[in-house]
Image (tube, rainbow, N blue to C red):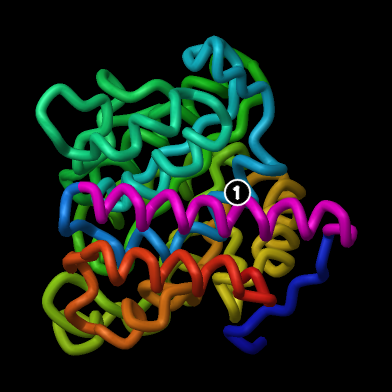
Amino acid sequence: MSNKESTTPATNNKELKKLKDLAKKIRINTVIEINSIGQGHIGGSLSIADVLAVLYGKHMKNLDPAHPNKEGRDRLVCSKGHAGPAVYAALAELGYFPKSELTTLNKNGSILPSHCDMNKTPGIDMTAGSLGQGFSAAIGMAIGSKLNNDDATIYCIIGDGESQEGQIWEAGMYAGNSNLNNLIVFTDYNKYQLDDEVAKINDLSNLVAKWKSFNFNVINVEDGNDIEQIDAAITKAKTSKHKPTMIILNTIKGKGVKFVEDAKPKNHSMPIDDEHMKIAIEEIKNDKGGK
């Protein structure tokens, strides 16, 4: 079997447009946030804008911005917590807090710290930042959901650099042995981490084979920034009867803004001044593909 598994689009044209528009808004909000502080984690935030749009725009159920801690809701743990600006961008669009808060990113008194913090930000389901720990927390949430029989799905996004942490594999071994079919995990496989290419620092080798050996249902999405492919992968993952699912998203770090994409490997955290913000927003707005 090829490591590249095909997925069948599960969206209609109207829904697809809605999700693409949401992804654009998430990207624009993210650029605005990082411009407001001068510099930030732009690359890994932009690379997950599409999966966030599909999750918050379609798949996550029982969400209520007026009651962010509602029992039985689906939950999302962004274990790569430095991509918090993208999650904040999505939550603002859903109405968890006013969009005006976005320009307070990482400033004194802000509800939007650099990394996700469930004690400060409405809609954040788990504090993250110490790489590997968010994944463990998501597994605990999935176990708790099973015990409560609340029919919730727990989603988790991990990074490829984060996947060099031993805790990821220890936690994955436990999840794969626990029949957690209510756990859907994404690897944001943009191939870069803070200092350089992942393959040059500590190569992850064959992630499909690795996660299958940990007893995960594995779906490898060739274009991890394609709304239809992401949607189809999540739809397929929900049919898993006994295993957790790992969806490997082959993404582009900085996706949607060319000067950020081109800055690899220096785009993990980079400055976004006013001029570059305008360029980025115009490019995102004019993107006909919407990926």
Magenta residues, as a range? Answer: 11-36
The relative height of residue 105 versus residue 208 in the rendered view (above or below) is above
Tag 1 secondary structure: loop
Residue 18 position in % (x across, y down) = 75, 51
**Left or right: 19 as drawn, with respect to 207:** right
Q: Is residue 75 left or right of residue 239?
A: left
Q: Callout 1: few (<14), some (14-19), or many (20+) C-alpha neighbours within 10 Å?
A: many
Give me the residue at 34% from left, 30% from top: 101
Amino acid type, mark 1:
Lys
Q: Is residue 85 magenta?
A: no
Rendered position, 131 above or below 112: below
Q: Up-down: is 41 above or below 102?
A: below
Look at 55% across and 19% down and name the residue there.
Answer: 65
On-image quarter of the N terminus:
bottom right
- The residue sitting at 22% across, 69% down in the picture is 268
Residue, disc 1: 243
Looking at the rendered image, the quarter that the C terminus falls into is bottom right
